């Protein structure tokens, strides 16, 4: 497998090593030029792939910027030569018409110098009135734009300040609420413990009441309680009992009066037999009434 791959990778490896060697040579040349310009020797360091790549990028950027700077410098030198030639022609013309700088009063020279400084400040190439007006208009427009931006920035700053104040107030409220909640934790925990205790007691009472209910239900089943025996039936039977007591009360009073009879055994025996028959009749009547009441409820 290695025999198959090695012939293909060999040219790639050689090309890569050749590229690295070329980059190292360019980096050395660039470092020498830079350090020679500063009057120093190139320090010794190890040429690793990372350092070579970094220095090569720096060299490429530096050379590009140096070339651009040379182009600008040549252009500025050419413009300076043209300006000097134009200045010489203008000076010659002024000297020919008697307006040389040496022959002008000092106030005129000062005014001309101020005018030139203003023109340079306004970035205009001449001192024509129209150029000054256009430059002043441009400055006014820039000033207006800056004022608008400043007003907009102040408005946004005011809005942000308002939001910040509201956020601070909200944060203060939340901190106060958090502190209040933390203070309420202990009482709430105590109340929860009390509720848990009461809940346990209520659960115990519930179990007790359920047991009592089961016991009472079993007791009612043992004594023969039926759902048909209602409160109304019991009240009705109590009223019948009262009626029977009213009816039997005269008989009982009569029987009590016989206790005062004279000691005649024959009369007493007859009276007793008569009262016995009346008492038996009353008992029979009471039984009939009770039977009829129970039959009606069924």
Image: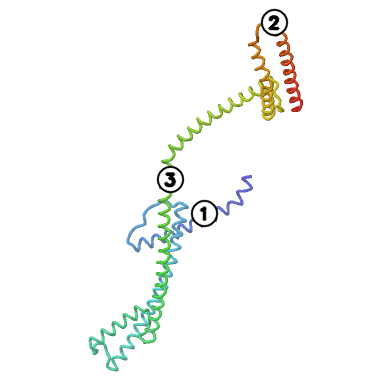
Across and down, in percent, residue 36 comes to: 35, 62
SS at badge 2:
helix
Residue at mark 2:
265
Depth check, mark 3 against mark 2: the one in front is 2
**Disc 3 or disc 1, which is closer to the eye?**
3
Of callouts 3 and 1, the N-terminal one: 1
Quadrant (top left, top right, bottom left, bottom right) of the N terminus: top right
Quarter of the image for residue 211 reads: top right
For the residues labelled 3 and 1, the Cα–Cα distance comes to 69 Å
Secondary structure type for disc 1: helix
Dot 3 falls on a residue whose secondary structure is helix
Q: Residues within 10 Å of mark 3 (few under 14, many from 20)?
A: few
Which sits earlier in the primary sequence, circle 3 or circle 2?
3
Q: Find disc 1 in the rendering and name its residue.
A: 17
Residue depicted at x 62% and y 46%? 3
Coordinates of residue 219 in the picture (x, y in percent): 66, 21
Q: Which mark is residue 178?
A: 3
**Contact flag, marks 3 and 1 (Cβ < 8 Å):** no
């Amino acid at each position: 497998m290695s025999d198959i791959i090695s012939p293909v990778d060999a040219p790639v490896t050689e090309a890569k090593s050749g590229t690295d060697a070329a980059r190292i040579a360019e980096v050395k040349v660039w470092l020498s030029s830079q350090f020679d310009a500063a009057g120093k020797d190139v320090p010794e360091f190890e040429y690793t792939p990372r350092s070579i790549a970094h220095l090569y990028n720096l060299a490429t950027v530096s050379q590009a910027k140096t070339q651009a700077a040379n182009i600008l410098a040549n252009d500025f030198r050419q413009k300076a030569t043209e300006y000097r030639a134009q200045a010489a022609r203008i000076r010659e013309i002024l000297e020919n018409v008697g307006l040389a700088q040496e022959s002008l009063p000092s106030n005129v020279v000062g005014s001309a110098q101020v005018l030139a400084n203003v023109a340079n400040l306004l970035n205009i190439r001449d001192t024509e009135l129209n150029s000054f007006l256009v430059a002043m208009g441009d400055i006014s427009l820039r000033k207006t734009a800056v004022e608008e931006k400043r007003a907009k920035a102040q408005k946004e700053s005011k809005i942000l300040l308002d939001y910040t104040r509201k956020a601070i107030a909200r944060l203060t409220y939340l901190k106060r609420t958090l502190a209040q909640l933390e203070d309420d934790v202990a009482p709430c925990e105590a109340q929860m413990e009390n509720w848990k205790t009461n809940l346990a007691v209520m659960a115990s009472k519930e179990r007790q009441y359920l047991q009592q209910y089961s016991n009472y239900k079993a007791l009612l089943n043992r004594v023969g309680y039926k759902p048909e025996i209602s409160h109304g039936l019991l009240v009705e039977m109590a009223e019948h009992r009262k009626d029977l007591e009213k009816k039997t009360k005269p008989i009982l009073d009569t029987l009590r009066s016989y206790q005062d009879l004279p000691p005649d055994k024959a009369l007493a025996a007859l009276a007793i037999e008569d009262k016995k028959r009346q008492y038996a009749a009353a008992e029979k009547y009471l039984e009939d009434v009770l039977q009829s009441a129970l039959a009606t409820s069924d």
